[in-house]
Image (cartoon, rainbow, N blue to C red):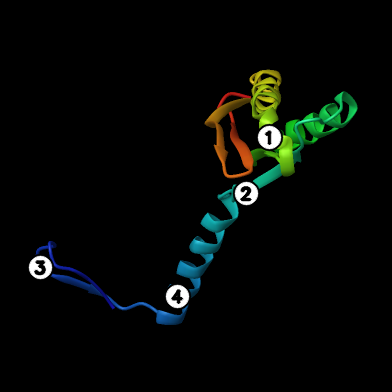
Amino acid sequence: MEVAPDANPPVCKIIDFGKHTFEKKKREKEAKKKQHNVSVKELRFRPHTDDHDYEFKLRHARKFLKDGDKVKATVQFRGRDIIYSDRGEELLNRLAEELEDISRVETPATLEGKRMSLILSPSKSK
């Protein structure tokens, strides 16, 4: 039963509750279809990543960004590789520059323990 208290005289409408719940669920399902879940895809590099491997991962990152996903690029340092942290930062900045036409940097390159990571999100204008 739906009541309209502002009406003069007060009006009451009798409805089928099953139909009402069915339509409500249908509206919610339709709204859920239209939303897009954003996931974070991760690409892992090493400080001595070769050009071919880098370009292969660059193509994957471009595909992920075009699909609307975020990309987390990580440079993994093992053992004494940590002394090449400048090379890792250079690699991540190069990745950000080459993808700046379809993405924007959400979190700049930061070193956390033995990992340096950068998060790119797709830009609004495609």
Amino acid bearing label 4: Thr
How would you rate the neighbour count of disc 2 (Cα within 10 Å): few for under 14, some for 14-19, many for 20 or more?
few
Q: Residue placed at 70% from the left, 33% from the top?
A: 66
Q: Quadrant of the C terminus?
A: top right
Q: Which residue is mark 2?
A: 39
Q: Which one is in front in this view, the residue at disc 2 or the one at disc 4? A: 2
Q: Secondary structure at mark 3?
A: loop
Decide if residue 73 is on the left or right side of residue 21: right
How would you rate the neighbour count of disc 3 (Cα within 10 Å): few for under 14, some for 14-19, many for 20 or more?
few
Amino acid bearing label 2: Ser
**Distance between the alpha carbons at the discs numbered 2 and 1:** 10 Å
- Residue 60 seen: yes
Q: Residue placed at 79% from the left, 36% from the top?
A: 60
> Residue 9 shows which numbered tag?
3
**Distance between the alpha carbons at the discs numbered 4 and 3:** 28 Å
Q: Position of residue 92 (x, y in %)?
A: 67, 27
Quick check: 26 above or below 15? above
